[in-house]
Image (cartoon, rainbow, N blue to C red):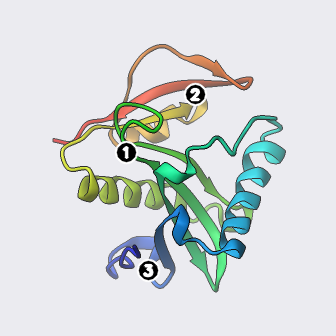
Amino acid sequence: MPFPAPAPHAGPLHGWQLQWSRLEQLDTGTLYQILQARAAVFVVEQQCAYADIDGRDHQAWHLQVRHGGELAAYLRLLDPGAGYAEPAIGRVLVLPPFRGLQLGRTLMQEGLDFAALHYPQQAIRIGAQHHLRDFYASLGFQADGEPYDEDGIPHLEMCYRPD
């Protein structure tokens, strides 16, 4: 199900393409680009050997942000119960050529807005890399528990609770 592009006031994404899809709506080439980007950022760049393809992509919405047809940013919104009891945002990435444009913040806000539409009044959970705690806190997430190690990277569960 395509999600409409943001209104002109949407900051750096104005004029860019935003596309929300379920896994079965993605064509093979698009899925390949997404998995390639996830591997490039989370496995290669962060030097973390982990199972990115975790069996949860079928239970998620996938947000692509494209510029000139090129994948610039991505996130995955898991359905409630797919990872946590609440809906969960994860696999948040901005590819290197598009960093420094505030896409991460805009991407997360789009994820929160979409979650509010599809999962009204439900909290949103993330497993944040610990060094990004202040970034997520600036979006309204609060720490929920103690830091933990995930694949050699310190993480912290955080939760966003709508008003």
Tell me if residue 102 can be seen.
no
Q: Where residue 128 appears, x then y in whole percent?
A: 53, 34
Amino acid bearing label 1: Leu
Which quarter of the picture shows residue 100? bottom right
Name above or below for residue 159 compared with residue 1: above
Residue matched to label 3: 14
Name above or below for residue 61 compared with residue 137: below
Which quarter of the picture shows residue 51? top right
Q: Earlier in the sequence, mark 2 or mark 1?
A: 2
**Disc number placed over residue 130 in the picture, else none:** 2
Q: Residue at x 37, y 45 (%)?
A: 139
Amino acid bearing label 3: His
Q: State the residue in front, 61 or 162.
A: 61
Q: Secondary structure at mark 2?
A: helix
Name above or below for residue 138 compared with residue 33: above
Residue matched to label 1: 139
Does the residue at mark 2 contact the one at mark 1 (Cβ under 8 Å)?
Answer: no
Give neighbour class at mark 1: few <14, some 14-19, many 20+ (Cα, 10 Å).
few
Does the residue at mark 1 contact the one at mark 3 (Cβ under 8 Å)?
Answer: no
Q: Secondary structure at mark 1?
A: loop
**Disc number placed over residue 9 in the picture, else none:** none
Report, in whole angstroms, how far the alpha carbon at label 2 lies from the one at label 1. 15 Å
Report, in whole angstroms, how far the alpha carbon at label 2 lies from the one at label 3. 30 Å
Q: Residue at x 72, y 68 (%)?
A: 33
- Give the position of the C terminus as an image quadrant: top left
Q: Secondary structure at mark 3?
A: loop
Tell me if residue 51 can be seen.
yes
Q: Earlier in the sequence, mark 2 or mark 3?
A: 3
Report, in whole angstroms, how far the alpha carbon at label 1 lies from the one at label 3. 20 Å
Give neighbour class at mark 3: few <14, some 14-19, many 20+ (Cα, 10 Å).
few
Name above or below for residue 105 compared with residue 162: below
